[in-house]
Image: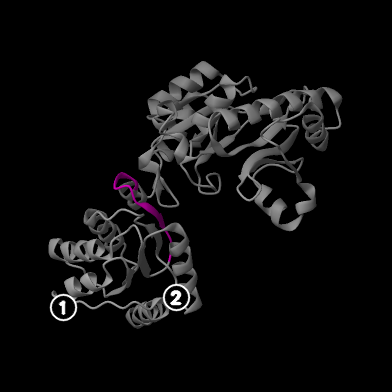
Amino acid sequence: MNLHEYQARALLKAAGVPVPDGDVAATPSEAEAIARRVGGTVVVKAQVHAGGRGKAGGVKLARGPAEARECASQILGMTIKGLVVNKVLVVPAADIATESYVGLILDRKTQKPVFMVSDAGGIDIEEVAAKTPEKITRLPIDPRYGLLPHQALQLALALYKDWSQAKAAMQILRQLYGVFMANGCTLAEINPLVTTPEGKVLALDAKMTIDDNELDRRPDLAVLRDESSEEQSEVTARRANLTFIKLDGNVGCVVNGAGLAMATMDLVKYYGGEPANFLDIGGSSNPEKVVSALKIITADPNVKVILFNIFGGITRTDDVANGIVAATKQFKVDVPIVIRLTGTNEQEAFRILESVGMTAMNDMDAAVSKAVKLAGEAA
């Protein structure tokens, strides 16, 4: 689950991180009132789960309440990378001397959070990572012991040579690590972490991603989810207890099991196609899951063929077949369906499909290559 900037800032502020004043607004008049309270020049920032807000016109400088109102009216309702802006953050404009980057990401391979810091922070940090990775200091943290003082000092000195600023950065690093661990984050970053001409160290922008598995035991975090800023097909899938990620290809995939789903997408690529999604119906034998999966995939106009790749272990292939039949009776599917079924109740599944004029196969390569061919012919 991605948090908006204003939500991530609130978590950091609660942990003691120095964050400038500001508030979120849903209307131009609210933005004007916040600007009046904050005083001086303010920045009005679109709150949307998309990068490149500034380049898209979603970040504007306002020299007073009236300008803040005008800026908010321009930003609210605009679309950035397919997402509509419903809220803006109004914060005081900072006088910046230097910009740095501080981030924590969960490395699933080592099962450790990894700090990444750079004194070349700001909007071009991705370019820094790609072209001059030596400017980024990386440090894995053992979660059994947490961020130790000498590690915090090492990271802080990679950012600042001034001792007072390094001490302030040490504290912020410890606080960021605490927020990361306490809230089940997979990503937490401050970009930029700035110094002012007076030497203060401030967190101006924040980004956080929380592991969905954390939300069942943390309803206080679950309420922060903004479904209007997410891909609606992914929202629908989550409500149907399906694991779904939309991609840019034209071969819609319905698979059971994350490993098989990844292998299926790899095979689609191998035969020259592009997967339109990752969709794992899991180990359930509930035909309604198949119906939901087909509704989600057929709503994507880019999909030219639907590929079922089911290995029946816990999942019964006859239940999947019944789900396919039920779905095609409920609504019209205008693209070809290629079905590969093998495993539990395989022969019964074949019989169910044949009874309605559909065919299935049990060879994975043959099914994937056929699906890619059909997608190519329809393109």
Examine the structure image and report whether residue 239 is included in the region drawn in magenta: yes
On screen, residue 378 versus residue 217, left or right, reads left
In the foreground, 311 or 155: 311
Where does residue 133 sit, x and y in percent of width and height? Answer: 75, 53
- Give the residue type that dot 1 points to: Gly
Q: Is residue 91 above or below residue 302?
A: above
Picture residue at 43% right of the left edge, 34% below the top: 215
Q: Which mark is residue 273?
A: 2
Examine the structure image and report whether residue 47 is included in the region drawn in magenta: no
Find numbered disc 2 in the image and state the secondary structure of the residue it sits on. Answer: loop
Q: Residues within 10 Å of mark 2 (few under 14, many from 20)?
A: many
Picture residue at 44% right of the left edge, 29% below the top: 221
Q: Which residues are magenta?
A: 238-248
- Give the residue type that dot 2 points to: Gly
Picture residue at 31% right of the left edge, 78% below the top: 361
Q: Which mark is residue 357?
A: 1
CA gap, disc 1 and disc 2 = 27 Å
